[in-house]
Image (cartoon, coloured by chain):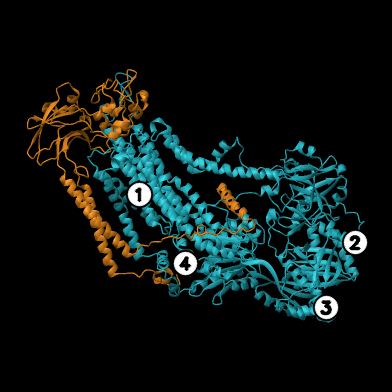
Amino acid sequence: MDKPPPHHESISSRWSFSSKDKEVTFADLGSKRIRHGSAGADSEMLSMSQKEIRDEDARLIYINDPDRTNETFDFTGNSIKTAKYSVFTFLPRNLFEQFHRVAYVYFLVIAVLNQLPQLAVFGRGASIMPLAFVLLVSAIKDAYEDFRRHRSDRVENNRLALVFEDNEFKEKQWKYIRVGEVIKVVSNQTLPCDMVLLATSDPTGVVYVQTTNLDGESNLKTRYAKQETLQKATDLETFDGFIKCEKPNRNIYGFQANMEIDGRRLSLGPSNIILRGCELKNTEWALGVVVYAGSETKAMLNNSGAPSKRSRLETRMNLEIILLSLFLIALCTTAAATAAVWLRTHRDDLDTILFYRRKDYSVRPEGKNHNYYGWGWEIFFTFFMAVIVYQIMIPISLYISMELVRIGQAYFMTRDDLMYDESSNSSFQCRALNINEDLGQIKYLFSDKTGTLTDNKMEFQCACIGGVDYSGREPAEIDGVTLKPKMRVRVDPSLLQLTRNNKATEEAKRANEFFLSLAACNTIVPIVTNTSDPNVKLVDYQGESPDEQALVYAAAAYGFLLIERTSGHIVINVRGEMQRFNVLGLHEFDSDRKRMSVILGCPDTSVKLFVKGADSSMFSVMDEESYGDVIEATKKQLHAYSSDGLRTLVVGMRKLNDTEFEQWHASFEAASTALIGRAGLLRKVAGNIETKLRIVGATAIEDKLQRGVPEAIESLRIAGIKVWVLTGDKQETAISIGFSSRLLTRNMRQIVINSNSLDSCRRSLEEANASVASDDEESVALIIDGTSLIYVLDNDLEDVLFQVACKSSAVLCCRVAPFQKAGIVALVKNRTSDMTLAIGDGANDVSMIQMADVGVGISGQEGRQAVMASDFAMGQFRFLVPLLLVHGHWNYQRMGYMILYNFYRNAVFVLILFWYVLFTCYTLTTAITEWSSVLYSVVYTSFPTIVIGILDKNLGRRILLSHPQLYGVGQRAEGYSTTLFWYTMFDTVWQSAAIFFIPLFAYWGSTIDTSSLGDLWTIAAVVVVNLHLAMDVIRWNWIAHAAIWGSIVAACICVVVIDVIPTLPGYWAIFQVAKTWMFWFCLLAIVVTALLPRFAIKFLVEYYRPSDVRIAREVEKLRSFSESQQNMGTEMNQIRDPPRR
Amino acid sequence: MSSNTASSSAGSGDSSAARKNSKRPKYSKFTQQELPACKPILTPGWVISTFLIVSVIFIPLGVISLFASQDVVEIVDRYDNDCIPAPARTNKVAFIQGAAPKSCNRTLTVTKRMKQPIYVYYQLENFYQNHRRYVKSRSDSQLRSPKFENQISACKPEDDAGGKPIVPCGLIAWSLFNDTYTLSRNNTPLAVNKKGIAWKSDKEHKFGNKVFPKNFQKGNLTGGATLNPDIPLSEQEDLIVWMRTAALPTFRKLYGKIETDLENGDTIQVTLQNNYNTYSFSGKKKLVLSTTSWLGGKNDFLGIAYLTVGGICFFLALAFTIMYLVKPRRLGDPSYLSWNRNPGGGR
């Protein structure tokens, strides 16, 4: 068992101990992170020291003995392979993966059916060509991508690391590193694998790592080597021990293991492991033993692709696909039944009918049936032949076109200048490629606050010292110091004056104390970096909480510059004078106490306790008797701060006398070496000492709104999107942010639900519901806090809340825990069919982002988990406006039209084929050549719809942004609906009839041959279908022209090419038929007749029942834009960015 | 889908590498989707003039089509029923398959002057030359070159006779039409030119001049005409015409051309051999003498269709004009926007 460590070190380093055993390294004042897989520090402690890792769940690593480690278990080596294929496996694996798509399986089944001799409709080549083409294109694309992955794998695997072998550190390529080996990493090196720390250059065993590659956070994190291994690691040869750790998993915040050395067992936690991909910083070197390598490292296990979601439009489309399948079955049944009837009525004559002749006399004199198996079988065969001939009724190529279109749309979204964020140098990212069009139908928006609406760049704004407010906002310069903080803070001149005067007034003393506590009471690590000017060095403060960073920068601005932090002491430059403070104890922040404290041994040998925390938790531990008036004044001031939307913290302190200190020291010692419930004991120790504090002051930090947020929220609201803000902040802060972001307005009635019990919660909700139901004129804002939400989400109140929320124009949820965020999204998602979008930036938003139909991640300050879980990622909240109102609108319109058009264009062709069957004795002859049938949906008509699907814009960007109401088109699903589907299908029947029957009657009883008529039908169909598209194109740029006219020309060229092959029956037919006037007369009559009804109805509808889009287009076209802006009579908002170029 | 993600991100990665530091998308009118474009909208003016233009084009075209059709003189004589002796009409199939003489005389009267060339057609009705089983039963490579004589797999059940390939094989060739017509005008023989009735392209490239009929109609069941084995297929124009299978079940095939004018009142005597069996599927046989116009044969459909469409367009143009005058709508009038029609609705 773990024994207390030997007490032979100096007192300061003994105290430093406390930080070493801390389990909690990710807690921060903002408390915005979720811990994966554990309920809290306490249970983690317990489970770690008490629960044995079961043998079957464990892996054993013998330190510095890779041979023994690897002989018992089959651990993976450290070479990574992100590439999917090798040269030999490429063909089978790639084919296998491609056939996961239903579309390809459909193609394949049809192609296989066609190979049966009885069903052979198309020739071999023609039936396999489209499938082969698509497979080939995808395979080439996959091969290229895989080649790139191979290349990057090779680079990664051949990097070098120092590995301890034969009693010295030798360079070894990453791919040869094995589990169990001891590796030395030096400063700024990237870690090759996950390893448990054994020793570091720091005598206390601290290392700093940067985890940017892992979770995107640029702050340094501290990790610790176990005290027991620090000494032993100097002599690695004799190092004998093993680690028993859990199986590889993807939780980057959790690690559970035991280490046994010299018969002693130590427990290891997440703070003892450093992970692959991290970089070592501020530490000369670190020694570690490899526990997970290669693909088993946490970094690689987390390397998963984008989430897969299905777009609403695609789901809706499935209904119509089923309808089309029913049509297909109906057509095939008709063909089969009529064929059967004909065979039945002519059953006695089949031998003599010249064009049938059932018997083959070459086999036997009396003849044997040739290719005739009785009329029952004939029904069967005819049916399946019909399926083959009419296969494109199910527009399978649509799925492929949709993918291409989405790639194109994604290309334009990522390239959009309006969605490029200069400050983080990030452009828009499309991570999920299959829900582009959902962006056009959003009805509910759930937004995180910190980091999403706000910058999460905390700025120190005001201080309240001894009840006096200092909130002057004059900028000031600090000159003449060689050490400069990296970030400037605006300072209050009177306060600065006060601290500089050095007068021993009570006020000045308090101010000094205040800033000293700000500089000291934190976990910030200062990093001194050189600048181009050798006399000036910059101090960069790295820490896990942005609030603390802001406070330390503020202290620096007032002359209290934190310069150095080791585990034993801190050095603060107090107005040019270096002062060294011993850190005797540190109670880290935890979410129960909501405060942190530090015990400092000051230069004047006094021992002081500094405490900093949330106001609610601080006032209860203040000495109210002595400082009641100050506390009252501070409370008042704090209320004012939070009404301004500022985040507040309260600072307190106490001088400790010797007995107090000794007492605390003893219990702290005991607690920090306890094996069971260490975190709980430490919390208790902290609780005991953090009492009777003297109030020093309060701080107010501004969490600045991001640029353009109020305007963005307003235009989203005008667009009919309900905006819900979910935040962990206090109610007052949340409401004030609500006002400053224009989510709330002064004329809104606020309904605040802030209950502590189920009953009161129910009562206030029902009251709210009644009041909302009674008058619908007034706009209402619902504000609900996390405690009430617990009752709501756990009970049957969800419906009531939903009803109230639906009628409110804004909903604000404060004090919300991460898991509640997902619960709220689910609450809405389960009760309505409207689309939901969640936007957030932190790990606590991940659940919400994944729950919503569309998840958007802000790639900002708080790491990359949100981005990794999101479907779309961008730099700023305000980009939502162009994303939804412009791109979402476009994508939805494009995709909706494209689906309808693809249904139409395939159905027209199928119907032409079907009509002909009625004139071929119900056999599935096609006048159109088989090659044209195959090429029709691939070459003749596919290109324009893809181009239009990517490029067409029903309205310009300017008008969409200036009239957010136009977004309603998508919310009301006007771009694609079953009604539109039926209209399209009626039109399809008419057009196919026009194409088919005009030539039929014109050529009835003439010498026309099958091939010529087939060519006429082919060309007529291609022209009509493309002109139909042309009629609906809104923006004719050169690409649209090229695609549409080019496609007609390409079709004609293909028809000609097919007809110059002498071995095909249709040889030269197109030339024969095209030189007759009849051909051209038919073509002209077909085109006009087919498109006439559509043209007339389109005009009538657009003119007499204009949609919003149509009106807006007229406005746009007639260039009365500025004039109409005034006429619109609605609020205009200029959210457009000023043109950058 | 994941592969797509990779490709698109890879794409942006490439270009960003070129610009090193900034990931700002390179600006172009194309990437910002601001390419210059024409954006036509359907205004009443455009629509009404479109309809007017269509009607102005279509009505004259309809008229000239009708005139062209009216100019065509055609004589049609259905003989399949009449050319069976009355007693045999109860079982026509037995008669046509039997050995009885099948000669038959028909008399046609010219009712209007016919200018040469006058085309002689036979018209078959209810004969499905487009039957799937039938159209596939041919070997185009065999027809072109003697090298491919054995490519007969598609020709079943008329592929070989006694193990030797049939040239030309297949049901189409087997069922070659074999009624013959001998024409005389006012008791003087009238020459019917049977040369040049097939497409030149077929004679030159599709039917080989070195391919001679072999084993043709030697099977157990004789379908239609026999071919002279000494004449190459490229010269067998009746076969070439027949092998251009008709698109529709009622069709004409060119039999020959009369290269003299026929006068009004002329009587044409036709001596025909009624050999072809259309009786088992109640098909009709007709002899047709017809002139042609620039638009083809006698068919009023297209003219009527053009007049109808032209008329409808004219009517629509008129109707839209009236509607426009009676109930106009100002284009781009924001009061029609849904959120302005019912105030507060869009908010």
Q: What element carries label 1?
A: helix
Q: Which of marks 1 and 4 is in front?
A: 1
Q: Name the residue under label 2.
A: A11
Q: Is residue A339 above or below residue A564?
A: above
Identified at 53% across, 54% down, the residue is A411
Distance between mark 2 and mark 4 Cα atoms: 71 Å
Q: Give the chain coloured orange.
A: B
Same chain for mark 2 and mark 4? The answer is: yes
Q: Name the residue under label 3.
A: A509
Q: What element carries label 3?
A: helix
Instruction: Say whether residue A770 is left or right of residue A925.
Output: right
Q: Of the residues under marks 1 and 2, which one precedes in the sequence? A: 2
Q: Mark 1 points at which residue?
A: A1023
Distance between mark 3 and mark 1 Cα atoms: 89 Å
Q: Of the residues under marks 4 and 3, which one precedes in the sequence? A: 3
Residue type, mark 2 in image = Ile
Same chain for mark 1 and mark 2? The answer is: yes
The front one of A105 and B7 is: B7
Residue A190: percent from the left, percent from the top? 74, 50
The front one of B26 and A171 is: B26
Q: Name the residue under label 4.
A: A959
Distance between mark 1 and mark 4 Cα atoms: 33 Å
Distance between mark 1 and mark 2 Cα atoms: 91 Å
Q: Of the residues under marks 1 and 4, which one precedes in the sequence? A: 4
Could you say which quadrant of the image residue A419 lies in? bottom right
Q: What element carries label 4?
A: helix
Q: Which of marks 4 and 3 is in front?
A: 4
Residue A645: percent from the left, percent from the top? 65, 73
Distance between mark 2 and mark 3 Cα atoms: 29 Å
Q: Of the residues under marks 2 and 4, which one precedes in the sequence? A: 2
